C-alpha cells in the first residue's frame, strides 16, 4: 500500500490534485441537484401548492419577505453545515447570539451606556461569537466530551452572560449605521439579505475548494482512518466550531440591526429551525453528507412552508403540526438512498 493510499487520498495524475477519501468529486458536487432531488422537489412542491392556493404568495412583496426572514437562518446553517458534516452538533447558537447581540448593543451608540465604538462594536460581537466557538472546540476535542453536552452548557453560559450584561432597562441602538442594515433597501431587500448571500458564497467556496472542507467530509465519514493517516483532525474540528461561533456572532449582530435594541432573548427560536433546516436539506446528523447549498435549501423549505401557511391563515398550532410532518417527509424522500450508511439507528 502506498503512502498516498494509506493517507486516504486518491491518487491523481495532476500534481496536487489528490482529494481526501469521503470528499465528493467536483463533478458530483456540481450534479448535486440531480442526485439529491428530495429536498429540491419538496421546495418546488411547496411553492407550487402555495402559489395555487394564494394569489399573493408569488407576489414580489411576499417573496421579499421570505428572503428577509431567511437571512439570519442562512448565515447560521452555513456554519452549522461544517459541524454536522464532521458528525458533531452545536446547540450553543441561541446563547452565543444573545451574548453577541447584548455586547454590540452596549458598545455601539445606545440609550443606556456612554460607549460609541461604531463598527468596532460590531466586530466585537462577531469576535465574541468566535471566542465561544473556540471554547467549544477546545473543550470538545481536548477533554473528549460529547459536543452535544459541551455546546448545551455553552448555550446556558451565553444566556447567562447576556443576562448579566443587561443593564436593567432595554438599551435602544442609536447608531444608524447598524440599524440601516435592516431598514435601507436595495433591489427591494435589506443589506442583511446581501450579507447572507455573501456568507453563503463564502461557505460554499470554503467547503468546495479548501483543505478544511475536504477534511470535514473525511472526518465525518471515517474519523478514525483520517486520524490514522496523520491528518490534523483536532485542528479542523476546532476550526469548525470557531466558524460556527463566528456565524452565531454575526447572527447576533444581524438580529440587533433588526430589533434596534439590546435583548438577552435575541437569539430565542433560532437553534432548532437551523438544525432542522440543515437536516431537511440533506446535511445528515450522522456526518459526511450534505453541504452548505443543501442546508440553505432546507432553510427555504421551512421559510416557504411558514410563509405559505400564514398566507392561508392556518392556525398557529396547526402550523407546528404541518412543519413537523413536512420535516419527516423531506427526510424520508431526501435520505432514503442513504439509509444503508446507518447500520444502527438510535
Image (cartoon, helix red, strand yellow):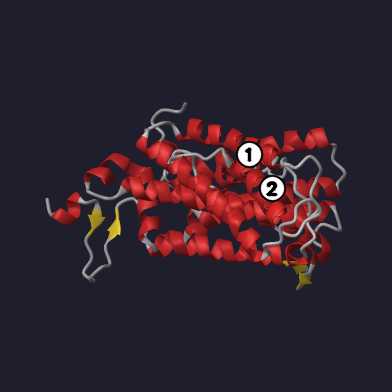
Quarter assignment of residue 139: top left
User: What residue sits 18% from the left and 53% below the top?
Assistant: 5
Q: In this view, does 302 lie to the left or right of 84?
A: right
Viewer can see residue 72? no
Q: In this view, does 22 lie to the left or right of 189?
A: left
Counting residues from the N terminus, which is met first, the one under dot 2 or under dot 1?
Answer: 2
- Where residue 160 appears, as percent x and y from the top left, is 64, 35
According to the image, label 2 marks what residue? 102
User: What residue sits 71% from the left and 61% below the top?
Assistant: 116
- Where residue 326 appears, as percent x and y from the top left, is 67, 40
Q: Which mark is on residue 161?
A: 1
- Where residue 261 appears, as percent x and y from the top left, is 78, 51
Q: In this view, does 82 lie above or below 15?
A: above
User: What residue sits 82% from the left and 37% below the top?
Assistant: 316
Q: Nearer the viewer, residue 86 or 322?
A: 86
Quarter assignment of residue 122: bottom right
Residue most extreme to the front: 114
User: Tag 1, which secondary structure?
Assistant: helix
User: What residue sits 44% from the left and 59% below the top?
Assistant: 207
Local crowd at mark 2 within 10 Å, few (<14), some, or many (≥20)?
many
Contact? badges 2 and 1 (CB < 8 Å): yes
Q: Which of 175 and 332 is in front in this view?
A: 175
User: Tag 2, which secondary structure?
Assistant: helix
Amino acid at each position: 500500500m502506498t503512502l498516498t493510499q494509506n493517507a486516504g487520498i486518491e491518487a491523481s495524475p495532476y500534481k496536487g490534485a489528490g482529494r481526501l477519501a469521503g470528499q465528493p468529486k467536483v463533478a458530483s458536487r456540481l450534479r448535486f441537484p440531480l442526485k439529491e432531488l428530495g429536498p429540491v422537489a419538496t421546495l418546488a412542491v411547496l411553492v407550487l401548492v402555495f402559489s395555487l392556493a394564494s394569489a399573493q404568495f408569488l407576489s414580489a412583496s411576499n417573496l421579499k419577505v421570505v428572503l428577509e426572514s431567511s437571512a439570519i437562518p442562512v448565515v447560521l446553517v452555513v456554519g452549522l453545515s461544517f459541524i454536522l458534516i464532521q458528525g458533531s452538533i452545536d446547540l450553543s447558537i441561541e446563547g452565543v447570539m444573545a451574548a453577541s447581540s447584548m455586547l454590540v448593543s452596549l458598545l455601539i451608540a445606545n440609550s443606556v451606556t456612554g460607549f460609541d465604538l461604531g463598527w468596532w462594536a460590531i466586530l466585537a460581537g462577531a469576535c465574541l461569537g468566535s471566542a465561544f466557538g473556540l471554547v467549544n472546540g477546545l473543550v470538545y476535542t481536548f477533554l473528549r466530551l460529547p459536543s452535544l453536552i459541551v455546546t448545551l452548557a455553552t448555550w446556558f453560559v451565553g444566556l447567562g452572560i447576556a443576562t448579566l450584561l443587561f443593564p436593567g432597562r432595554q438599551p435602544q441602538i442609536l447608531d444608524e449605521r447598524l440599524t440601516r442594515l435592516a431598514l435601507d433597501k436595495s433591489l427591494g431587500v435589506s443589506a442583511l439579505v446581501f450579507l447572507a448571500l455573501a456568507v453563503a458564497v463564502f461557505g460554499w467556496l470554503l467547503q468546495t475548494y479548501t483543505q478544511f472542507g475536504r477534511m470535514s467530509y473525511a472526518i465525518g465519514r471515517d474519523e478514525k482512518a483520517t486520524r490514522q493517516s496523520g491528518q490534523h483532525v483536532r485542528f479542523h474540528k476546532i476550526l469548525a466550531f470557531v466558524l460556527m461561533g463566528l456565524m452565531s456572532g454575526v447572527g447576533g449582530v444581524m438580529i440587533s440591526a433588526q430589533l434596534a435594541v439590546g435583548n438577552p432573548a435575541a437569539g430565542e427560536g433560532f437553534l432548532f429551525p437551523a438544525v432542522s433546516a440543515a437536516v431537511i436539506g440533506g446535511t445528515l446528523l450522522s456526518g459526511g453528507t450534505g453541504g452548505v447549498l443543501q442546508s440553505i435549501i432546507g432553510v427555504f423549505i421551512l421559510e416557504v412552508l411558514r410563509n405559505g401557511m400564514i398566507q392561508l391563515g392556518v392556525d398557529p398550532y396547526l402550523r407546528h403540526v404541518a412543519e413537523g410532518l413536512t420535516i419527516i417527509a423531506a427526510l424520508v424522500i431526501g435520505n432514503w438512498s442513504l439509509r444503508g450508511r446507518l447500520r444502527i439507528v438510535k
